[in-house]
Amino acid sequence: MDKEKPCVNDNIVCKTIGSEKMLYNPSTDAVHFLNQTSALIWELSDGKHTLTDMEKAIRRKFLVPENADVLGDIKRILDEFQKQGLLKDTGI
Amino acid sequence: MEEELTSLKKKATFCDNYEFLGHHFQIRSDSQQVLDEFKAIYRHFKLNHAPLKDERLTCYLLSSTPLNKPIIIIGKDCYPLESPGITLNTYFFHLIAPRLKEYFLIHGGVVSWKGKGIIISGHSTFGKTTLIIELIKRGFMFLSDEVAPIHRLSHKIVPFPRSIGVRRSTLRLFKGLKVCSNGHENRKYMIDIEDIYQGKIGTSCRPRYVIFLSANLDKDLSKKGDLRFLEIALNRINQNLVRDLRVINGVIDVSEVPGRQYPVLRILLDRKKRTANQLKEVCNKHKCLIFYSIFGKTRTPDFNVSPILTSINKTQGVMELMRMILSGYQPTMVDDVFDGSPCRMLMELADIAKDIQFYQLSMGKLDEMGDLITQLVSD
């Protein structure tokens, strides 16, 4: 699973507002607010980055302690993206 | 009814033409005095020519009617003024606002500094106008006192230089001032900004700052466990309205707030229940116009303390802008413009908010508030 490369749903409208992102899903007519961590995961969900790549990027950017379960958090966030219809079905 | 309206309209022999945000209006009245007062307040919007009939909307401001109260007629709709605290002029803009769909209309004053727009929003007792005048004294340009019209395509604030409503205490600050209207407008005196500071009306500009005025930064008194207060200001209140509001699921109690300039209801709500749409529907059913709605009991600020300016994150700022638009001049905008989707409206506001910084300013001494804002825009 860690080698899969999630990819965003092309129909999602994304706007950056300050340090956060807003995602609008026209099919569900819902807006989702992403904090900085989720926003980075979203940016890296381009079909080119694995979960391991995402973990490295997050640890580097946010100076996360070694013992933090970053991979677990990434999976939970991507699960939520999937549930909300924000990823392509071939994502994870 | 239609015959009566036609007969009333025939008495409106006085007329002038105006343009508000690109829309043409012909204002007709049975009273030259009403027309003169309207002109005094909206003098910068008056046209010297009559637009073509197809390109204008005719509005009737009638002071003498069989109902023994003034009325406004727009199209086939007739709006009597129920409260002496509301004037034809205030009522008029609230009635035409929903037609101005190319704009987001935010309740607040607007000034600009070197082409950067600053929107200042707050409750009517918070001294917003006095602060606006203080900033103009310091070299800011005046765009509006009452409403910030942001064009939805260009994202620019368009000037709306209606006369400013000031209370007697503020009026005393300006000696020899020419007053447009003597205390008829919600117990305020109307003065034109050009009569205080000539050449200070600004031009269209992009909004760069939105400042929300607050009484203080104490804990939110609007919440009482699972309950919260909502105050709504209306053009009129009757017992049938109150009765129907009380039976909405989620409404615990409804009471009238005494001593206000216009009718205000305080509604105690169950925070867990969604009541906003039903509240609006009941008000619409009783043809009651909502001037504004605000959560929490309004507190009079203390103007003798030092003010505090704190930054707010953009997401929160955008949500607050949306709330202000929907609880102010454009309560039906989601349905009228965005096909019932508040999310689409939110995304459009987010586009505008990209370049805006949001702040909360807790009120205090006027000169210190002026200092904080001047420093903010100069940095």
Image: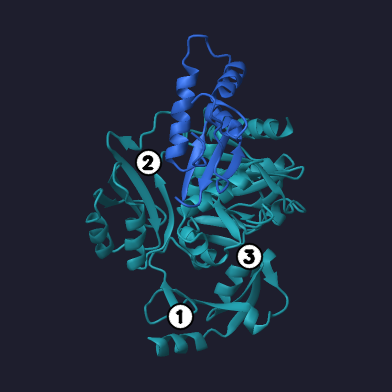
In front: B184, or B92?
B92
Q: Which chain letter matches label 2?
A: B
**Are dots 2 and 1 on a single chain?**
yes
**What residue would you read off at disc 2?**
B296
Which secondary structure, mark 1?
loop
Whether residue B257 is visible: no
Q: CA distance from mark 3 to mark 1?
A: 24 Å
Identify which residue is drawn at 61% across, 63% down. Answer: B41
Tell which chain the image draws in blue.
A
User: Residue flagged by tag 3: what amino acid is it?
Assistant: Tyr
Residue B258, compared with residue B55, is above or below; it is above
Q: CA distance from mark 2 to mark 3?
A: 33 Å
Identify which residue is drawn at 29% across, 46% down. Answer: B273
Residue B156, compared with residue B40, is above or below; it is above
Name the disc covering residue B42, or none: 3
Q: Earlier in the sequence, mark 3 or mark 1?
A: 3
**Are dots 2 and 3 on a single chain?**
yes
Tell me the mark number nearer the camera, choosing from 2 and 3: 2
**Neighbours of disc 2 within 10 Å: few (<14), some (14-19), many (20+):** some
Whether residue A21 is visible: yes
Taking the image as shown, residue B131 lies to the left or right of residue A87, namely right
User: Residue flagged by tag 1: what amino acid is it?
Assistant: Lys
Identify which residue is drawn at 52% across, 10% down. Answer: A65
Tell which chain the image draws in cyan.
B
Q: Earlier in the sequence, mark 2 or mark 3?
A: 3
Q: Which chain letter matches label 1?
A: B
**What residue would you read off at disc 1?**
B76
**Neighbours of disc 3 within 10 Å: few (<14), some (14-19), many (20+):** some
